[in-house]
Image (cartoon, rainbow, N blue to C red):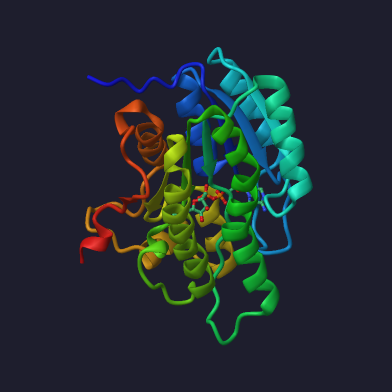
Amino acid sequence: MLMFNSANKVAFITGAAHGQGRAVALALAKEGTDIVAFDVARNLEYPAYTFGSSAELDSLKADVEALGVQCLTVAGDVRSDADIVRAVDETMSRFGRIDILFNNAGICAYGLAHELEEDAWDAMLDINLKGAWLVARRVIPVMIEQRSGVIINNSSIAGLRGMGRLSHYAASKWGLVGLTKSWAIELAPYTIRVNSIHPTGVNTPMNDGLAALEGTTTQEIAERSAGNLLPVPWVEPDDVAGMVLYLTSDAARYITGSQFVLDAGLLTR
Ligand SMILES: NC(=O)c1ccc[n+]([C@@H]2O[C@H](COP(=O)([O-])OP(=O)(O)OC[C@H]3O[C@@H](n4cnc5c(N)ncnc54)[C@H](O)[C@@H]3O)[C@@H](O)[C@H]2O)c1
Protein backbone atom coordinates (compact mmCIF):
# COMPACT_ATOMS: atom_id res chain seq x y z
CA MET A 1 0.00 0.00 0.00
CA LEU A 2 1.46 3.35 -1.03
CA MET A 3 1.63 5.94 1.74
CA PHE A 4 1.01 9.68 1.53
CA ASN A 5 4.73 10.21 2.17
CA SER A 6 4.53 14.00 2.53
CA ALA A 7 7.10 14.18 5.34
CA ASN A 8 10.20 16.33 4.81
CA LYS A 9 8.70 18.02 1.78
CA VAL A 10 8.19 21.74 1.15
CA ALA A 11 4.90 23.17 -0.12
CA PHE A 12 4.51 26.64 -1.63
CA ILE A 13 0.88 27.71 -1.27
CA THR A 14 -0.60 30.91 -2.70
CA GLY A 15 -3.68 32.48 -1.13
CA ALA A 16 -2.80 30.72 2.10
CA ALA A 17 -4.03 33.22 4.70
CA HIS A 18 -7.53 31.82 4.91
CA GLY A 19 -10.07 29.61 3.14
CA GLN A 20 -8.88 26.65 1.10
CA GLY A 21 -5.21 27.66 1.13
CA ARG A 22 -5.15 27.64 4.93
CA ALA A 23 -6.84 24.22 5.14
CA VAL A 24 -4.39 22.74 2.63
CA ALA A 25 -1.43 24.23 4.53
CA LEU A 26 -2.59 22.65 7.79
CA ALA A 27 -3.36 19.27 6.19
CA LEU A 28 0.10 19.09 4.58
CA ALA A 29 1.75 20.30 7.80
CA LYS A 30 0.06 17.45 9.68
CA GLU A 31 1.78 15.07 7.24
CA GLY A 32 5.17 16.61 8.05
CA THR A 33 5.46 19.10 5.16
CA ASP A 34 7.12 22.49 5.70
CA ILE A 35 4.91 25.33 4.49
CA VAL A 36 5.52 28.53 2.55
CA ALA A 37 2.35 30.60 2.95
CA PHE A 38 2.14 33.33 0.31
CA ASP A 39 -0.77 35.79 0.39
CA VAL A 40 -1.46 39.36 -0.67
CA ALA A 41 -2.54 39.89 2.97
CA ARG A 42 -4.46 43.10 2.32
CA ASN A 43 -7.70 44.12 0.67
CA LEU A 44 -7.49 44.84 -3.06
CA GLU A 45 -9.81 47.25 -4.88
CA TYR A 46 -11.64 44.47 -6.73
CA PRO A 47 -13.65 42.65 -5.55
CA ALA A 48 -14.66 44.88 -2.61
CA TYR A 49 -14.68 42.05 -0.10
CA THR A 50 -12.33 40.89 2.63
CA PHE A 51 -9.04 39.36 1.51
CA GLY A 52 -6.60 37.51 3.74
CA SER A 53 -4.69 39.53 6.35
CA SER A 54 -1.22 39.54 7.89
CA ALA A 55 -2.84 38.61 11.24
CA GLU A 56 -4.26 35.48 9.54
CA LEU A 57 -0.82 34.66 8.11
CA ASP A 58 0.65 34.99 11.62
CA SER A 59 -2.02 32.74 13.09
CA LEU A 60 -1.48 30.14 10.33
CA LYS A 61 2.26 30.20 11.04
CA ALA A 62 1.61 29.53 14.75
CA ASP A 63 -0.82 26.69 13.94
CA VAL A 64 1.55 25.09 11.41
CA GLU A 65 4.56 25.32 13.74
CA ALA A 66 2.50 23.80 16.56
CA LEU A 67 2.40 20.69 14.36
CA GLY A 68 6.19 20.44 14.52
CA VAL A 69 7.08 21.70 11.02
CA GLN A 70 8.34 25.06 9.76
CA CYS A 71 6.31 27.85 8.21
CA LEU A 72 7.59 30.78 6.16
CA THR A 73 5.00 33.49 5.53
CA VAL A 74 5.35 35.96 2.67
CA ALA A 75 3.09 38.94 1.99
CA GLY A 76 3.01 39.29 -1.77
CA ASP A 77 0.81 39.59 -4.83
CA VAL A 78 0.69 36.81 -7.44
CA ARG A 79 0.61 39.59 -10.07
CA SER A 80 4.05 40.82 -8.99
CA ASP A 81 7.06 39.00 -10.35
CA ALA A 82 9.25 40.88 -7.84
CA ASP A 83 7.14 39.56 -4.93
CA ILE A 84 7.28 36.02 -6.33
CA VAL A 85 11.05 36.10 -6.88
CA ARG A 86 11.51 37.37 -3.31
CA ALA A 87 9.33 34.55 -1.97
CA VAL A 88 11.08 31.84 -4.00
CA ASP A 89 14.51 33.20 -2.99
CA GLU A 90 13.51 33.18 0.70
CA THR A 91 12.12 29.66 0.30
CA MET A 92 15.33 28.39 -1.27
CA SER A 93 17.51 30.03 1.42
CA ARG A 94 15.37 28.54 4.18
CA PHE A 95 14.44 25.10 2.79
CA GLY A 96 16.55 24.55 -0.36
CA ARG A 97 13.70 22.92 -2.32
CA ILE A 98 10.06 23.16 -3.38
CA ASP A 99 8.19 19.86 -3.75
CA ILE A 100 4.61 21.09 -4.02
CA LEU A 101 3.09 24.20 -5.59
CA PHE A 102 -0.58 24.85 -4.85
CA ASN A 103 -1.66 27.66 -7.18
CA ASN A 104 -4.71 28.67 -5.18
CA ALA A 105 -4.87 32.48 -4.89
CA GLY A 106 -7.95 33.72 -6.66
CA ILE A 107 -10.83 36.16 -6.69
CA CYS A 108 -14.47 35.88 -7.72
CA ALA A 109 -17.10 38.49 -8.54
CA TYR A 110 -20.36 38.70 -10.46
CA GLY A 111 -21.05 40.74 -13.56
CA LEU A 112 -22.83 40.33 -16.90
CA ALA A 113 -20.35 40.27 -19.78
CA HIS A 114 -21.82 43.40 -21.39
CA GLU A 115 -21.73 45.33 -18.12
CA LEU A 116 -18.24 44.38 -16.92
CA GLU A 117 -15.64 47.12 -16.66
CA GLU A 118 -12.33 46.42 -18.35
CA ASP A 119 -10.57 46.76 -14.98
CA ALA A 120 -12.70 43.93 -13.56
CA TRP A 121 -11.82 41.65 -16.49
CA ASP A 122 -8.12 42.48 -16.13
CA ALA A 123 -8.05 41.88 -12.36
CA MET A 124 -9.85 38.53 -12.74
CA LEU A 125 -7.56 37.23 -15.47
CA ASP A 126 -4.39 38.73 -13.98
CA ILE A 127 -4.87 37.14 -10.54
CA ASN A 128 -6.60 33.84 -11.37
CA LEU A 129 -4.79 32.91 -14.57
CA LYS A 130 -1.69 35.01 -15.21
CA GLY A 131 -0.82 34.87 -11.49
CA ALA A 132 -0.70 31.07 -11.59
CA TRP A 133 1.71 31.23 -14.53
CA LEU A 134 3.87 33.95 -12.94
CA VAL A 135 4.32 31.83 -9.81
CA ALA A 136 4.89 28.59 -11.71
CA ARG A 137 7.43 30.31 -13.97
CA ARG A 138 9.69 30.85 -10.93
CA VAL A 139 8.99 27.52 -9.21
CA ILE A 140 9.32 25.21 -12.24
CA PRO A 141 13.11 25.73 -12.64
CA VAL A 142 13.56 24.62 -9.01
CA MET A 143 11.50 21.49 -9.65
CA ILE A 144 13.34 20.78 -12.93
CA GLU A 145 16.63 20.96 -11.05
CA GLN A 146 15.24 18.47 -8.48
CA ARG A 147 13.71 16.37 -11.27
CA SER A 148 10.58 16.08 -9.13
CA GLY A 149 7.57 18.10 -8.05
CA VAL A 150 3.81 18.38 -7.97
CA ILE A 151 1.79 21.37 -9.16
CA ILE A 152 -1.92 21.68 -8.44
CA ASN A 153 -3.97 24.50 -9.94
CA ASN A 154 -7.16 25.38 -8.07
CA SER A 155 -9.72 25.88 -10.82
CA SER A 156 -13.46 25.44 -10.13
CA ILE A 157 -16.56 23.80 -11.56
CA ALA A 158 -16.54 27.09 -13.51
CA GLY A 159 -13.47 25.69 -15.28
CA LEU A 160 -15.58 22.87 -16.73
CA ARG A 161 -18.93 24.55 -17.51
CA GLY A 162 -20.45 27.93 -18.31
CA MET A 163 -21.75 30.13 -15.50
CA GLY A 164 -23.92 33.20 -16.01
CA ARG A 165 -22.67 36.48 -14.49
CA LEU A 166 -19.32 34.77 -14.05
CA SER A 167 -17.92 34.71 -17.59
CA HIS A 168 -14.65 36.42 -16.67
CA TYR A 169 -14.25 34.04 -13.71
CA ALA A 170 -15.09 31.03 -15.89
CA ALA A 171 -12.65 32.20 -18.59
CA SER A 172 -9.87 32.38 -16.00
CA LYS A 173 -10.73 28.94 -14.61
CA TRP A 174 -10.97 27.27 -18.06
CA GLY A 175 -7.61 28.89 -18.77
CA LEU A 176 -6.12 27.01 -15.82
CA VAL A 177 -7.11 23.74 -17.50
CA GLY A 178 -5.09 24.76 -20.56
CA LEU A 179 -2.11 25.58 -18.37
CA THR A 180 -2.48 22.31 -16.46
CA LYS A 181 -2.53 20.09 -19.53
CA SER A 182 0.26 21.98 -21.32
CA TRP A 183 2.57 22.10 -18.28
CA ALA A 184 1.94 18.37 -17.72
CA ILE A 185 3.32 17.74 -21.22
CA GLU A 186 6.31 20.05 -20.75
CA LEU A 187 7.22 18.74 -17.31
CA ALA A 188 6.58 14.99 -17.48
CA PRO A 189 10.19 14.28 -18.56
CA TYR A 190 11.31 15.71 -15.20
CA THR A 191 8.80 13.64 -13.18
CA ILE A 192 6.87 16.80 -12.35
CA ARG A 193 3.12 16.18 -12.23
CA VAL A 194 0.50 18.86 -12.90
CA ASN A 195 -3.22 18.52 -12.18
CA SER A 196 -6.18 20.83 -11.61
CA ILE A 197 -8.94 20.57 -9.03
CA HIS A 198 -12.51 21.71 -9.59
CA PRO A 199 -14.52 22.35 -6.42
CA THR A 200 -18.17 23.32 -6.30
CA GLY A 201 -19.00 26.10 -3.78
CA VAL A 202 -16.67 25.92 -0.78
CA ASN A 203 -17.46 27.29 2.67
CA THR A 204 -14.80 30.04 2.73
CA PRO A 205 -14.60 33.83 3.24
CA MET A 206 -14.91 34.21 -0.57
CA ASN A 207 -18.58 33.23 -0.48
CA ASP A 208 -19.20 35.40 2.60
CA GLY A 209 -17.71 38.29 0.62
CA LEU A 210 -19.85 37.59 -2.45
CA ALA A 211 -22.94 37.38 -0.23
CA ALA A 212 -22.17 40.75 1.32
CA LEU A 213 -21.69 42.32 -2.14
CA GLU A 214 -24.98 40.80 -3.37
CA GLY A 215 -26.88 41.69 -0.17
CA THR A 216 -27.81 38.07 0.49
CA THR A 217 -26.73 35.09 2.59
CA THR A 218 -23.71 32.84 2.05
CA GLN A 219 -26.04 29.83 1.74
CA GLU A 220 -28.03 31.55 -1.02
CA ILE A 221 -24.81 32.34 -2.90
CA ALA A 222 -23.67 28.72 -2.66
CA GLU A 223 -27.01 27.36 -3.85
CA ARG A 224 -27.29 29.86 -6.68
CA SER A 225 -23.93 29.04 -8.18
CA ALA A 226 -24.00 25.35 -7.45
CA GLY A 227 -27.08 23.15 -7.27
CA ASN A 228 -25.22 20.17 -5.92
CA LEU A 229 -26.58 16.66 -6.42
CA LEU A 230 -25.78 15.65 -2.84
CA PRO A 231 -27.90 17.53 -0.29
CA VAL A 232 -25.22 20.01 0.83
CA PRO A 233 -25.00 23.73 0.01
CA TRP A 234 -21.22 23.60 -0.23
CA VAL A 235 -18.18 21.50 0.56
CA GLU A 236 -15.70 22.34 3.31
CA PRO A 237 -12.08 23.54 2.88
CA ASP A 238 -10.99 20.27 4.52
CA ASP A 239 -12.61 18.34 1.65
CA VAL A 240 -10.39 20.26 -0.76
CA ALA A 241 -7.40 19.59 1.48
CA GLY A 242 -8.09 15.84 1.31
CA MET A 243 -8.05 15.92 -2.49
CA VAL A 244 -4.82 17.96 -2.54
CA LEU A 245 -3.22 15.58 -0.05
CA TYR A 246 -4.00 12.65 -2.32
CA LEU A 247 -2.74 14.37 -5.48
CA THR A 248 0.53 15.43 -3.84
CA SER A 249 1.13 11.96 -2.48
CA ASP A 250 2.99 9.00 -3.90
CA ALA A 251 -0.40 7.28 -4.20
CA ALA A 252 -0.98 9.60 -7.20
CA ARG A 253 2.51 9.17 -8.67
CA TYR A 254 1.25 8.38 -12.17
CA ILE A 255 -1.52 10.97 -12.29
CA THR A 256 -0.76 14.06 -14.38
CA GLY A 257 -2.59 16.40 -16.74
CA SER A 258 -5.94 15.51 -15.15
CA GLN A 259 -8.95 17.40 -13.83
CA PHE A 260 -10.22 16.36 -10.40
CA VAL A 261 -13.83 17.24 -9.69
CA LEU A 262 -15.04 17.85 -6.11
CA ASP A 263 -18.58 18.90 -6.93
CA ALA A 264 -20.99 16.95 -4.71
CA GLY A 265 -22.28 15.49 -7.97
CA LEU A 266 -23.14 18.84 -9.60
CA LEU A 267 -21.67 18.14 -13.03
CA THR A 268 -23.57 14.84 -13.27
CA ARG A 269 -26.70 16.68 -14.43
N1 LIG B 1 -15.03 29.40 -2.46
C1 LIG B 1 -15.52 28.74 -3.51
O1 LIG B 1 -16.74 28.51 -3.57
C2 LIG B 1 -14.61 28.23 -4.59
C3 LIG B 1 -15.06 27.20 -5.43
C4 LIG B 1 -14.23 26.70 -6.42
C5 LIG B 1 -12.96 27.24 -6.58
N2 LIG B 1 -12.56 28.28 -5.79
C6 LIG B 1 -11.20 28.78 -5.99
O2 LIG B 1 -10.40 28.37 -4.91
C7 LIG B 1 -9.35 29.31 -4.65
C8 LIG B 1 -9.35 29.68 -3.17
O3 LIG B 1 -10.60 30.24 -2.87
P1 LIG B 1 -11.16 30.47 -1.40
O4 LIG B 1 -12.57 30.02 -1.44
O5 LIG B 1 -10.25 29.96 -0.37
O6 LIG B 1 -11.16 32.09 -1.44
P2 LIG B 1 -10.89 33.17 -0.29
O7 LIG B 1 -11.26 34.48 -0.89
O8 LIG B 1 -11.56 32.74 0.94
O9 LIG B 1 -9.30 33.09 -0.11
C9 LIG B 1 -8.44 33.47 -1.19
C10 LIG B 1 -7.10 33.89 -0.64
O10 LIG B 1 -6.30 34.33 -1.78
C11 LIG B 1 -5.67 35.54 -1.44
N3 LIG B 1 -5.42 36.33 -2.66
C12 LIG B 1 -6.35 36.90 -3.46
N4 LIG B 1 -5.75 37.61 -4.44
C13 LIG B 1 -4.43 37.45 -4.26
C14 LIG B 1 -3.29 37.93 -4.96
N5 LIG B 1 -3.42 38.77 -6.02
N6 LIG B 1 -2.05 37.56 -4.54
C15 LIG B 1 -1.92 36.74 -3.46
N7 LIG B 1 -2.96 36.28 -2.74
C16 LIG B 1 -4.21 36.63 -3.14
C17 LIG B 1 -6.64 36.23 -0.49
O11 LIG B 1 -6.00 37.24 0.29
C18 LIG B 1 -7.18 35.06 0.33
O12 LIG B 1 -6.42 34.82 1.48
C19 LIG B 1 -9.62 30.47 -5.60
O13 LIG B 1 -8.78 30.35 -6.74
C20 LIG B 1 -11.07 30.27 -5.98
O14 LIG B 1 -11.36 30.85 -7.23
C21 LIG B 1 -13.35 28.78 -4.80
- Residues 79 and 208: in front is 79
- Above or below — where is 266 with respect to 115? above
Query: Which quadrant of the figure contains the C terminus?
Result: bottom left
Residue 122 or residue 22, whichever sits in front = 122
Query: Along the horizontal axis of the image, is 242 left or right of 179?
Result: left
| Rendered residue at 49%/69% (across/down) | 171
Residue 20: x and y in percent read 49, 42
Q: Quadrant of residue 63?
A: top right
Q: On the rendered image, what quadrant is the N terminus found in?
A: top left
Where residue 40 sits in the image (x, y, percent)? Answer: 70, 46
- Please identify the residue farthest to the bottom as the structure is shown: 114
Tell me which residue sits at (50%, 56%) in the image.
207
Foreground residue among 223 and 135: 135
Percent x, y for residue 247?
37, 36
Q: Position of residue 201 (x, y in %)?
A: 40, 55
Task: Please state if 251 lies on the left or on the right of 9 as rendered.
Answer: left
